[in-house]
Image (cartoon, rainbow, N blue to C red):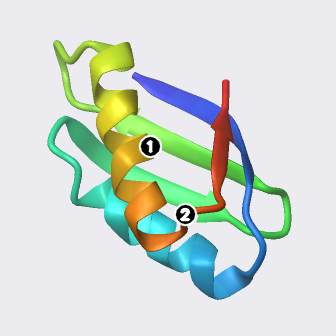
Amino acid sequence: MKKTYHIDVDCANCANLMEEAARKTEGIKNAVVNFMTQKMILEFEEGQEEKKIMRAVTKACKRVEPDCEIYQ
């Protein structure tokens, strides 16, 4: 399943770090963060609970960019 989220991030480098952090999160098959459009596209692995995985993604992203926000 793929879902698109709106993000609030300050710089392109931070967006790249968020993308890398999201990709490394268990339950995420692929992640793409676009700084220009302020969007994050996540592809979840089969059978994963979206809310649980999103908590982990948000936590991982906040480690690399504490000011970032992810909106559904």
- The quadrant in which residue 34 appears is bottom right
Q: Quadrant of the N terminus?
A: top left
- The quadrant in which residue 24 appears is bottom left
Image location (x, y in percent) of residue 21: 34, 64
Residue at the outermost bottom position: 13
Q: Quadrant of the C terminus?
A: top right
Badge number at residue 35: none
Residue drawn at point x = 59 percent, y = 61 percent: 33
Q: Amino acid at mark 2?
A: Pro
Question: Earlier along the polypeptide chain: callout 2 or callout 1?
Answer: 1
Q: Amino acid at mark 1?
A: Thr
Badge number at residue 66: 2
Residue at the outermost front position: 66
Q: Report how far apart the C-alphas of labels 2 and 1 lie in the structure.
A: 10 Å
The vertical placement of 39 against 5, above or below, is below
Mark 2 Cα within 10 Å, few/some/many (few <14, many 20+)?
A: few
* Disc 1, SS: helix
Q: Which residue is mark 1?
A: 58
Image location (x, y in percent) of residue 7: 71, 48
* Disc 2, SS: loop
Q: In the rendered picture of this protein, how many numbered marks are placed on residues?
A: 2
Image location (x, y in percent) of residue 41: 56, 44
Do the CB atoms of the residues marked 2 and 1 lie less than 8 Å apart?
no
Residue drawn at point x = 61 percent, y = 48 percent: 40
Image location (x, y in percent) of residue 38: 79, 56
Residue drawn at point x = 48 percent, y = 65 percent: 18
Please indicate whether residue 32 sits to the left or right of residue 1 in the image: right
The vertical placement of 50 against 64, above or below, is above
Residue at the outermost right position: 37
